[in-house]
Image (cartoon, helix red, strand yellow):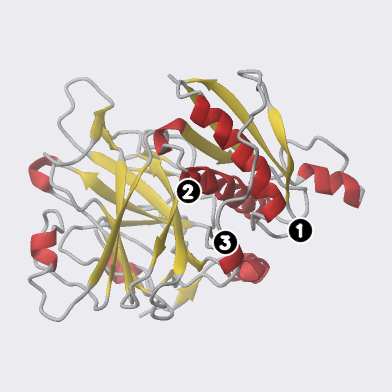
């Protein structure tokens, strides 16, 4: 076995920098550590360190070290690797209910009653005939290894004696069919205290899957690339335990299709935590959207230019995701909100001063009529 580790310095910088954001509980989150450079399809479990597949579905591993299973070109299209050199590829929808999954042990058992945030990046492969609108995340007490190639349904899971589960489904109507960019998918949940493994995939059969046909005469499946899986505990101050901010229900009027910047949603260097002052601003937006059901919102996150482009993209994604998640927690429907991180590519002030960098660490939004 060849123990080979690529981009160690990059990942060391990445995770040391994000230590302020709390430790990621997912091992080898961007599939950079591998036991063998991928040489054929369906060899994810054998090639990737720490990771496995809970069923017989043949999940794929792509890495720039390979000429056969390399990046960005592969058998299902083209996708750049934004977080190193490797990523996973799996079918979330295919004929005869065929499914593929990824599975990895967490660094520690989750604490019962504590709030966590799970996130990962996805991109739909160009040659996919379908796109799905939901991503399933299953936490289990014990490692799963089932002799099936179909959906990992509740019936199959509960045949395993002594195992326990915590299942969640993340629906992303706005993001499911992006074939160019990596899109951040994230959600929060309360732990049961049994979670030792995380499994990602589609746990429904074809009839129960919410899907969208991307091509005429579609007969194949929905194939997604997956990268940068993260699981972080949410600090108490980030939750709604202390109740919602007291905000006057009288709302402002916002010009549609125009970029607005949150006045108080600014961030300290290397942080994405939403402060109470920021929550007040966000709830004003929520009040406006709640009073105008025909409108939707796009949230854009930005950083200064300190750090690598990859890290700043990640950080800006987390910043606008924090705003989006709070809007959802307040009651905004997920199909009325989308968000995107731009890193430091769109400054509005000079990065040569701390004042300028502070202005660049911002979150903006555009309100528009629903499509």
Q: Which of label 2 and label 1 is nearer to you?
A: 2
Which residue corresponds to mark 2?
Answer: 329
Q: Is residue 348 depicted above or below 169 in this figure?
A: above
Gap between marks 1 and 3 measured at Cα: 25 Å
Gap between marks 2 and 1 measured at Cα: 25 Å
Taking the image as shown, residue 152 lies to the left or right of residue 339, namely: left
Residue 128 lies, in percent from the top left, at 28, 35
Taking the image as shown, residue 322 lies to the left or right of residue 355, namely: left
Residue 223 lies, in percent from the top left, at 28, 43
Residue 126 lies, in percent from the top left, at 35, 34
Of the residues under marks 1 and 3, which one precedes in the sequence?
3
Q: Which mark is residue 269?
A: 1
Q: How many marks?
A: 3
Which residue corresponds to mark 3?
Answer: 242
Q: Which mark is residue 308?
A: none
Q: Which of label 1 and label 3 is nearer to you?
A: 3
């Amino acid at each position: 076995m060849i123990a080979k580790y690529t981009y160690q310095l990059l990942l060391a910088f990445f995770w040391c920098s994000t230590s302020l954001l709390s430790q990621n509980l997912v091992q080898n989150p961007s599939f950079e550590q591998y036991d063998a450079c991928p040489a054929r399809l369906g060899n994810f479990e054998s090639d990737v360190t720490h990771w496995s597949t809970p069923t017989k579905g043949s999940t794929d591993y792509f890495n720039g070290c390979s000429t056969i299973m390399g990046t960005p070109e592969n058998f299902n299209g083209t996708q750049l690797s934004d977080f190193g050199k490797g990523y996973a590829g799996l079918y979330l929808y295919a004929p005869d209910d065929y499914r593929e999954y990824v599975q990895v042990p967490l660094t520690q058992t989750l604490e019962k009653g504590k709030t966590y945030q799970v996130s990962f990046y996805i991109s739909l492969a160009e040659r996919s005939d379908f796109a799905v609108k939901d991503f399933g995340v299953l936490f289990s007490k014990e490692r799963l290894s089932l002799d099936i190639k179909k959906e990992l349904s509740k019936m199959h899971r509960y045949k395993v004696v002594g195992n326990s589960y915590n299942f969640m489904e993340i629906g992303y109507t706005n993001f499911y069919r992006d074939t160019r960019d990596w899109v951040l998918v994230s959600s929060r949940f309360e732990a049961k205290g049994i979670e030792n493994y995380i499994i990602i995939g589609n746990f429904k059969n074809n009839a129960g899957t919410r899907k969208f046909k991307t091509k005429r005469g579609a007969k194949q499946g929905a194939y997604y690339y997956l990268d940068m899986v993260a699981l972080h505990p949410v600090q108490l101050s980030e939750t709604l335990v202390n109740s919602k901010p007291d905000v006057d229900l009288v709302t402002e009027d916002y010009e549609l299709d125009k970029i607005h910047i949150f006045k108080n949603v600014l961030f300290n260097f290397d942080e994405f935590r939403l402060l109470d002052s920021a929550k007040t601003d966000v709830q004003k937006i929520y009040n406006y959207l709640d009073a105008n059901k025909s409108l939707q919102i796009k949230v854009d996150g930005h950083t200064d230019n300190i750090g690598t482009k990859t890290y700043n993209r990640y950080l800006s994604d987390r910043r606008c995701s924090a705003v989006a998640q709070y809007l959802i927690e307040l009651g905004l429907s997920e199909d009325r909100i989308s968000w995107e991180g731009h890193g430091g590519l769109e400054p509005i002030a000079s990065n040569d001063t701390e004042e300028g960098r502070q202005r660049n660490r911002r979150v903006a939004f555009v309100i528009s009529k629903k499509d």
